[in-house]
Image (spheres, rainbow, N blue to C red):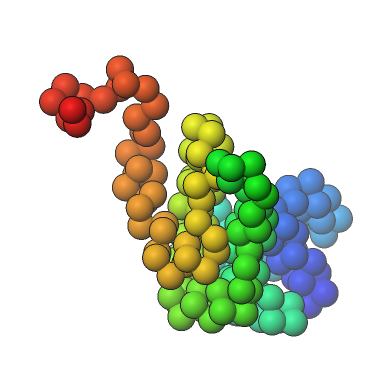
């Protein structure tokens, strides 16, 4: 991997579009495309839908062991305020969580899916004011909490009000 290719991969990892635009101006569009394809062929990048480019676990391993878990850890909320008003740390038992997460996640696609479900859960809980009910990280991973949110994510519709509940589905 050339230094230019390394910088391109870092900018893609950081989702720094202005940095990518700048490096494209400096080295030229053709060379930029060639470097991206070289990184893809070497297994450092994955191109989804001919549009979205993501870095792979192989690239993360070049960053001194930073991998999928580190990205997941960064996306997970640090703490929440529970219903009794007490601040609770959600990022507990980091080494145990890393072991659990790495056992579950074997591919970039699985990692992306889990992180997308996590982001969706955070968004929905924030919107509804229920972030205080979120599980701590070890329990979230162990209980495979993302599976509870993936169906809601697929439909992209969460029932927000009583008016949205279909007739005959309300528990009396």
The answer to whether residue 12 is visible is no
Say if 132 sits above or below 24 in the image.
Answer: above
Say left or right for 36 vs 19: left
The answer to whether residue 119 is visible is yes
Give whichever of 143, 110 is nearer the camera: 143
* Image coords of residue 112 (percent x, y): 50, 60
Work out which quarter of the rendered image holds the C terminus and state it.
top left
Say if 134 sits above or below 73 in the image.
Answer: above
Say left or right for 172 vs 141: left
* Image coords of residue 70 (percent x, y): 65, 69
Residue at left offset 43%, top offset 70%: 142
Residue at left offset 67%, top offset 49%: 87
Residue located farthest toward the left when viewing the structure as drawn: 168
* Image coords of residue 154 (percent x, y): 34, 44
Residue at left offset 53%, top offset 34%: 129
Residue at left offset 55%, top offset 53%: 52
Work out which quarter of the rendered image holds the N terminus and state it.
bottom right
Residue located farthest toward the right when viewing the structure as drawn: 26
* Image coords of residue 79 (percent x, y): 66, 53
């Amino acid at each position: 991997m050339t230094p230019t290719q390394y910088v391109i991969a870092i900018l893609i990892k950081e989702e720094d579009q202005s940095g990518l635009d700048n490096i494209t101006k400096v080295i030229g569009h053709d060379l930029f495309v060639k470097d991206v394809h070289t990184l893809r062929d070497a297994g450092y990048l994955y191109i989804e839908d001919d549009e979205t480019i993501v870095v792979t676990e192989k690239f993360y391993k070049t960053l001194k062991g930073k991998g999928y878990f580190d990205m997941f850890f960064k996306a997970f909320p640090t703490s929440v305020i529970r219903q009794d008003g007490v601040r609770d740390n959600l990022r507990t038992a980091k080494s145990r969580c890393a072991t659990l997460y790495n056992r579950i996640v074997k591919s970039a696609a699985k990692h992306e899916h889990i992180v997308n479900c996590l982001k969706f859960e955070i968004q929905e809980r924030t919107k509804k004011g229920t972030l205080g009910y979120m599980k701590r990280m070890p329990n979230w991973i162990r209980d495979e909490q993302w599976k509870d949110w993936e169906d809601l994510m697929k439909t992209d519709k969460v029932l927000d009000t009583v008016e949205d509940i279909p007739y005959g589905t309300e528990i009396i």
